[in-house]
Each structure stands twice: as C-alpha cells, then as structure tokens.
Amino acid sequence: MTHRLLIVISTVWIFLGLSGCAPEGPPQEAPETAVEAAGPRLSVEGVHAQLMGEMGAVYFRVVNQGSASDRLVRVETPAAESAETHESLVEDGVVRMRARPDGFEIPAGGSLSLEPGGKHVMLMGLDTAAMATGRLPLTVIFEHTPPVEVEIEVDAAGEGGAGHEHG
C-alpha cells in the first residue's frame, strides 16, 4: 500500500513538473489579493480654504495613480457643523451651487480638482473657537481608499493657507 501511494504521488509530481505546473519558489498570492493591490492609489495635494465667518470652502486635488477608479465620498472636520461636496454650475447665464451628496469620481490614472468656481467642499457652521487654534483638521473619505488626514493652517483673519497630509 505504501509503495502504491508513493508511485501515485511520484507520478502526479512528475506530471506537474513536465506540464510546467510544479511549484517553483515561494507560493504566489491569490488573485483577489493581486486585484486589491492593483486598485486606486490616491494622494491629496494643494489643500487650501477660503473661510468667511461661519462658512468656508475647501479646495484640493486628488491624484489617482492606480489602475481602478475611486470616489471622493465626503470630508469631515470637527471644526464645522457640516462639510458637503458641492459644484458650481452655470445655468441660463447664472452661476448656481449644487450639493453633490454622491461625491466625485476619481478616474484610474487621472485626477480630481476641487477649485473655486467648480467642485469644492462647503463648510457650514464653522466653530470660531476651533479656528482660533490656527489649524483646520480635515479627514478626506473615499469609497475604496482609506481616509486621508490633512490639516490647513489658518491665519488670524480666518484665511486658510496651504495644508499638508498627515496620513
């Protein structure tokens, strides 16, 4: 019985070796892992804000160097009652601002620009006491990519300057 089992195992091993299926080196990762690794790879750049009293707008650019699209879902900050994705559009010669609760698509290998007169994040109910710290912390939340922590330096007049990424 032992010889018969050895012959079967040897035959299978020889067959796999001849067909090019024999394992060589370390085992390969499962295809699911490879797909995840090929997904979106996002970075947040050029974060700045225009702040006016209890309201403000945040602008930045998201670059996707990955092979899959992602979506900017929302932005959160403890310094405001709410932060909403918005877009300014010209309709019948009039500029109108529309809430975009579904956020914005970030194409694979592309980018998303939030800028004055276009896509942006509206901050409402800014906490002036929180703004006195000179920092406006933001968490940028995506559909697939982990959240990115950024911070905008705010001067005494409430103007938001350049920000930097924390995560």
Image (cartoon, grey):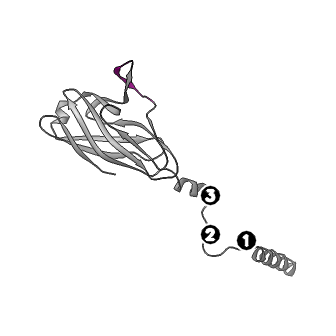
Q: Mark 2 = which residue?
A: 27
Q: Mark 1 = which residue?
A: 21
Tell whether 2 sits left or right of 152: right
Give the amino acid at mark 1. Cys
Which residue is nearer to you in this view: 122 or 12?
A: 122
Which residue is nearer to you in this view: 128 or 34?
A: 34
Indicate the position of residue 6 as horizontal and vertical percent values.
82, 79
User: Which residue is drawn at the image coordinates 62% and 60% (left, top)?
Assistant: 30
**Closer to viewer: mark 2 or mark 3:** 3
Which residue is nearer to you in this view: 96 or 28?
A: 96
Give the amino acid at mark 3. Pro
**Closer to viewer: mark 2 or mark 1:** 1
Element at badge 3? helix
Q: How far apart are marks 2 and 1 (CA)?
A: 12 Å
Q: Mark 3 = which residue?
A: 31
Part of the protein shown in magenta: 92-101
